[in-house]
Image (cartoon, rainbow, N blue to C red):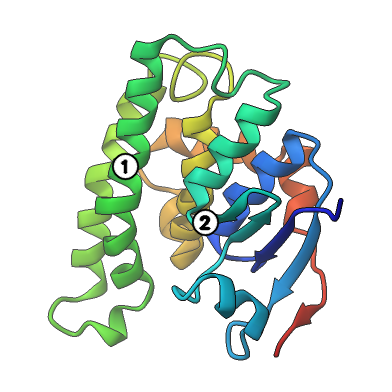
């Protein structure tokens, strides 16, 4: 049987979180690093969305990053990112991820590319992002990670986006009031797993 195929893009936060779950689950993969300006036809043939990540398994195609994470953790969750938590904690984790994906990420895109959205200035977009950062900050005041003192699905699904946010104006982020969130991000960026999945690989096109 051939290996599952993952179409990915190194810097994409959605792809980063999918790769971390797949690698942590110790799943052997055939990874195709995609050039977003020249997407491979094989990827477009199986997912008309044209966005990464896309995972092709023997049972079908998964083209939503959170679904890829859950598929990987259902196969193998050695560190208990999901399996160790109660149903109540899983609900909280999913609420945080949904808020990240549906509310924070659109504001993050406008903050990062403020010149493309001249309706408001960059400070305004950052202020909208701060509403979500405060949610994280409140959670992290009580524990090392978002759902207690061990890493969970919520941490791994969310931190690639906070990493992206932190890089828009690094000086601002490094001195901002969200001290617990900054500490949390630093700890996760230092994980060998993240270092592994962010390593550069050659891209492919059509």
Task: Count neighbours of disc 2 (C-alpha within 10 A) and say few if under 14, some if 14 to 19, many if 20 or more.
Answer: many
Answer yes or no: is residue 136 visible: no
Examine the rendered structure and indicate whether residue 171 appears above or below residue 40. above
Q: Residue at x 63, y 57 (%)?
A: 55
Q: Quadrant of the C terminus?
A: bottom right
Q: How many marks?
A: 2
- Indicate left or right for 77 with 132 as reference: right
Return the x and y of residue 91 as percentages of the image width and height.
33, 22
Return the x and y of residue 112 as percentages of the image width and height.
38, 71
Return the x and y of residue 54 as percentages of the image width and height.
59, 62
**Dot 1: element:** helix
Q: Residue at x 57, y 46 (%)?
A: 68
Q: Circle 2 is placed at which residue position?
A: 14
- Indicate left or right for 151 with 93 as reference: right
**Dot 2: element:** helix
Image quadrant where residue 156 sits = top right
Image quadrant where residue 135 sits = top left
Structural distance between the alpha carbons of marks 1 and 2: 13 Å
Image quadrant where residue 134 sits = top left
| Mark 1 or mark 2, earlier in chain | 2
Return the x and y of residue 111 as percentages of the image width and height.
31, 69
Q: Circle 1 is placed at which residue position?
A: 98
Q: Residue at x 84, y 46 (%)?
A: 28
Q: Residue at x 62, y 75 (%)?
A: 43
Is 1 or 152 nearer to us in this picture? 1
């Amino acid at each position: 049987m051939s290996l599952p195929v993952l179409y990915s893009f190194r810097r994409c936060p959605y792809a980063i979180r999918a790769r971390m779950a797949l690698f942590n689950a110790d799943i052997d993969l055939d990874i195709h690093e995609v050039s977003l300006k020249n997407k491979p036809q094989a990827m477009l043939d199986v997912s008309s969305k044209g966005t990464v990540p896309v995972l092709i398994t023997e049972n079908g195609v998964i083209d939503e990053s959170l679904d890829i994470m859950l598929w990987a953790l259902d196969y193998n969750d050695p560190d208990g990112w999901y399996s160790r938590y109660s149903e109540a904690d899983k609900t909280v984790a999913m609420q945080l991820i949904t808020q990240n994906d549906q509310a924070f990420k659109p504001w993050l895109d406008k903050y990062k590319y403020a010149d493309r959205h001249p309706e408001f200035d960059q400070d305004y977009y950052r202020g909208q992002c701060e509403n979500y950062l405060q949610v994280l900050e409140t959670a992290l005041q009580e524990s090392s990670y978002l759902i207690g003192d061990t890493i969970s699905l919520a941490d791994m699904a969310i931190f690639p986006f906070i990493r992206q946010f932190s890089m828009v104006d690094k000086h601002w982020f490094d001195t901002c009031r969200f001290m617990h969130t900054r500490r949390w991000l630093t700890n996760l960026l230092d994980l060998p797993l993240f270092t592994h999945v962010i390593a550069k690989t050659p891209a492919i096109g059509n």
